[in-house]
């Protein structure tokens, strides 16, 4: 069965507001690049449905969903709503599509879990909103689509699900949802001492989680060691019926919101290895705040899922998609040439630091 890509045009023209890190286009650029390269024929594409409030109640509280819908409708929130639900804040602002857009991303992950009932590979790059809480917006996330997908798998009778999260930030919302679960194993690599400040090495979520906080400057060699010694063995020993990968694009060197230094080769290697370790594979997006880095990384994910060779140089149509991007930050004023011409970053290999090796050994000793 060929991999399926779930997308929507709602991501093209909606924005969190001009000053928000998510003011940049992301999923729309990935769709355009994949189409320009001839990688996204109509039969591989599914339009993401918008999840109905009733479906969101699988995880979210009715009063929170109602508050989110009301905020979209009135384009305002009361002080009480802001305090109680985290809506209308700097990180989770009021904007025109503030319910419809996250409900579409959530609808995509719910659809993905349905499509994967008998097996397969599905990619929903708009998903991966791993900070969402049952009754509260959190960390740019209004809803939590990974949790909704996992709950859908569980309701379908699956009993062993591995959730891998390589976003630069810890997946606090997902971890809270499956703390103590014997059916869900969560593996997260994230930058230490960064918001939301959860996911310590010692935090096992009642045995359900493997958390690896990593120091600034994490390089590709270090990531490959983590992949080989923690992520892949912790996945394999759980014998997963489904794997969900949150493939946030904010752990790359050029991202403005983290201080990790991976190249996109690291993410692609994780995708390539995890792809064949379970009969069901759902890949989600997540963070990522440099429009060129996100587009190139996530387009490459789709190529890896399909076994398409990543070309040395993109074709002219794809290069013009990347050439049309603008970014309201210093690095966006004079973007380097490879941001337009290629998908693949130069590898960033380096020393594997002793502290990381020690932390990895501690986690590896728990794998069974
Ligand atoms: Zn992140």
Image (cartoon, grey):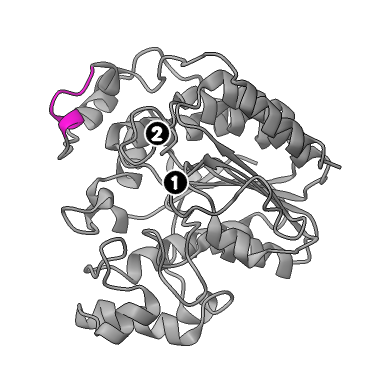
Measured from the top left, where is residue 66 in percent x and y?
Answer: 39, 85
Instruction: Residue 34: name its quadrant.
Output: top left
Q: Which residue is drawn at 26% across and 45% down?
A: 25
Measured from the top left, where is residue 169 in percent x and y?
Answer: 48, 47
* Quadrant assignment for the N terminus: top right
* Quadrant assignment for the C terminus: top right
Measured from the top left, where is residue 65 in percent x and y?
Answer: 42, 80
Viewer can see residue 355: yes
Label at residue 194: 1
- Residue 332: say if magenta: yes
Above or below: residue 53 compared with residue 103:
below
Q: What stretch is highlighted in magenta?
A: 330-336
Q: Residue at x 76, y 63 (%)?
A: 181
Disc 1 crowd, CA 10 A, few/some/many (<14, 14-19, 20+): some
Viewer can see residue 111: no
- Residue 210: say if magenta: no
Disc 2 crowd, CA 10 A, few/some/many (<14, 14-19, 20+): many
327 left or right, relative to 26: left
Instruction: Residue 151: name its quadrant.
Output: bottom right
Report the front residue among 59 and 136.
136
Are dots 1 and 2 in contact, CB under 8 Å?
Answer: yes
Above or below: residue 165 compared with residue 89:
above
Mark 1 or mark 2: name the one nearer the start of the chain: 1
Mark 1 lies on a secondary structure that is loop
Residue with the mark numbered 2: 259
């Amino acid at each position: 069965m060929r991999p399926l890509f779930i997308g929507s045009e709602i991501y093209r023209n909606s924005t969190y507001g001009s000053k928000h890190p998510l003011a940049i286009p992301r999923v729309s650029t990935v769709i355009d690049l994949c189409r320009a390269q001839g990688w996204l024929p109509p039969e591989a594409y599914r339009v993401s449905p918008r999840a109905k409030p009733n479906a969101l109640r699988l995880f979210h509280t009715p009063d929170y969903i109602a508050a989110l819908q009301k905020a979209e409708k009135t384009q305002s929130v009361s002080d009480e709503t802001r305090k109680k639900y985290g809506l209308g804040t700097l990180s989770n602002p009021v904007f025109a599509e503030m319910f419809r857009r996250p409900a579409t991303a959530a609808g995509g992950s719910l659809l993905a879990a349905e499509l994967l009932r008998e097996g397969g590979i599905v990619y929903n790059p708009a998903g991966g909103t791993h900070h969402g809480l049952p009754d509260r917006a959190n960390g740019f996330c209004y809803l939590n689509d990974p949790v909704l997908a996992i709950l859908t798998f569980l309701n379908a009778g699956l009993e062993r699900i591995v959730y891998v999260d390589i976003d630069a930030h810890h997946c606090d919302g997902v971890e809270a949802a499956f703390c103590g679960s014997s059916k869900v194993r969560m593996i997260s690599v994230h930058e230490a001492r960064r918001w939301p400040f959860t996911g310590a090495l010692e935090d096992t979520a009642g045995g359900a989680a493997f958390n690896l906080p990593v120091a600034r400057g994490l390089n590709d060699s270090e990531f490959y060691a983590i992949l080989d010694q923690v992520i892949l063995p912790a996945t394999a020993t759980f014998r997963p019926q489904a794997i969900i990968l949150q493939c946030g694009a904010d752990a790359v060197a050029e991202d403005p919101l983290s201080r990790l230094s991976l190249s996109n080769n690291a993410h692609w290697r994780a995708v390539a290895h995890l792809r064949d370790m379970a009969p069901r594979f759902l890949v989600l997006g997540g963070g990522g705040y440099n429009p060129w880095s996100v587009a190139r990384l996530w387009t490459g994910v789709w190529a890896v899922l399909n076994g398409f060779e990543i070309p040395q140089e993109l074709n002219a149509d794809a290069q013009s998609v990347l050439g049309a991007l603008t970014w309201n930050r210093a690095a966006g004023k004079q973007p380097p040439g490879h941001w337009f011409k290629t998908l693949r970053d130069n590898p960033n290999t380096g020393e594997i630091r002793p502290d990381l090796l020690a932390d990895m050994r501690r986690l590896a000793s728990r794998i069974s």
